[in-house]
Image (spheres, helix red, strand yellow):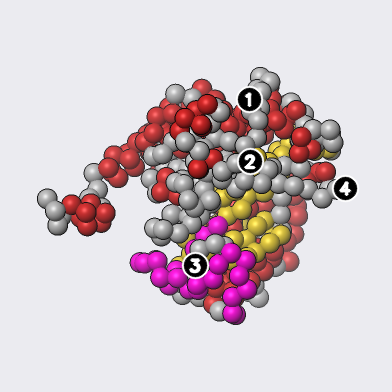
Amino acid sequence: MARKTRDEAREYVLKMAKEHDVKFIRLWFTDILGLLKSFAITVEELEGALEEGMGFDGSSIEGFCRIDESDMMALPDPETFQLLPWRPREHHSVARMFCDVMLPEGTPFEGDPRFVLKRNLQRAAELGYTFYVGPELEYFYFKDKYGTEPLDEGGYFDMTPLDLATDLRRETVLTLEAMGIGVEYSHHEVAASQHEIDMRYTDALTMADSVMTYRLVVKQIALDRGVHATFMPKPVFGVNGNGMHTHQSLFKDGHNAFFDPDGQYGLSQTARSYIAGLLKHAPEFTSITNQLVNSYKRLVPGYEAPVYLSWARRNRADLIRVPGYKPGKEDATRIELRSPDPACNPYLAFSVMLAAGLEGIEKGYECPDPIEENVYVMSLEERTRRGVGSLPSTLYEAVQLTQQSDLVRKALGDHVFNAFIQNKLIEWDEYKAQVTEFELNRYLPVF
């Protein structure tokens, strides 16, 4: 479906605001860590905001700017206008729009993650490609935010009795659909009280906005029911963590550029070079797709989370999986990157994935052979012989690799790249000075 012109979209927003008696509009944008920021305007300011944007102080937003460069403008994207279903609808309803962050003179702000993704999508467009993604965000429901007591004891795809978690998931799906976000699946995940709702495959910018909305809706519905939802990558020791397996493909001239009926698994040379790009550059961009100290507690053997740089069709231990497709559904050909977690900034995560894949295509990377055996049971010597590398094992190791990456720097731009690295090094310094329960339990009784 063709996008409206900005004038058409603006007129649509003004009409919808009047028809639904909208009083407040929340303007949403994200900081470099992917945390949602917001301020509200009244409907009386809406027309002016759509024309010129609304000013705000950017100096207090993580990674944005210094105090002497604090003036920013939030320019609403009228295509993202949606009523908030959890707010009153009968009188003085509330809507939201995502914003592009601009400098006062009207040029895009290089520190805006949404602009970073737009810039990478433009690079793909110049090569003739449209980037589609379908992330699968997992999360836990806990009794409250102070502990990890689960709401249920179900397992993968379990049909649990109609309990609070089932109702929460149902209400979340209905709310997402009311906000224009298509949902394909919702189900119980592997661990107790772990759940997943899969949004319908779409273009990367729309999906990044949808991920931000999805995380808020999941947490808002849980809060309304008196429980806590978390996308923390590994909140509970000894069980599966939360992943964000990201399905992705490139379309060109209306056709899936990843499909070739004569290729292995139906994959084109474009798809194989894209896979090779992800495999080669994954260690460099892991700090972006897995940005927390806690992220690396998930990326360990034994919990279906990838550690090694390999790809295959059926082996879910690999970094990249190639899902099967039904005959006649060739447009569904895609690859699934299994390392990201749902605490990432989706705008930056999609940017580095795309940049790595395009690098593989442009430079003609050769794709290694798939590995259908279980990589986890191979010896180090066997993995070395077969050229299977590994992801970084700590945030510090990941940041060190990112610091040396020209690809990530180019994908993010100097502003976001430097601010992100600085933030993560501070996080690591704070973490490594902590005394943990593990240390107390192991060392205090002995030494």
**Residue 11 visible at all:** yes
Q: CA distance from mark 4 to mark 3?
A: 37 Å
The residue type indicated by label 1 comes to: Glu
- Numbered range of the magenta stretch: 138-162
Q: Which residue is mark 2?
A: 372
The amino acid type, in three-letter code, at marker 2 is Glu
**Rendered image: mark on residue 359:** 1
Figure quadrant of residue 318: top right
Q: Amino acid at mark 3?
A: Ala
* Picture quadrant where residue 361 is located: top right
Q: Let me know if residue 387 is in the magenta part.
A: no
Question: What residue appears at the point 43 percent right and 72 percent down from the top-left corner?
Answer: 143
Q: Earlier in the sequence, mark 3 or mark 1?
A: 3
Q: CA distance from mark 2 to mark 3?
A: 29 Å
Relative depth, front residue between 367 and 135: 367
In this figure, which residue is indicated by the disc labeled 4? 328
> In front here: 365 or 423?
365
Q: Nearer the viewer, mark 4 or mark 2?
A: 2
Query: Percent from the top left, x then y, of residue 396?
Result: 36, 36
- Under circle 4, the secondary element is loop
Nearer to the camera, 337 or 411 = 337
In the image, which is nearer the foreground, mark 3 or mark 1?
3
**Residue carrying label 3:** 192
The answer to which of marks 4 and 3 sits earlier in the sequence is: 3
| Residue at x 58% of width, y 64% of height | 156
Q: Secondary structure at mark 2?
A: loop
In primary-sequence order, the first of circles 1 and 2 is 1
Mark 1 or mark 2, which is nearer to you?
2
Q: Confirm or deny contact between disc 4 and disc 2 (CB under 8 A).
A: no
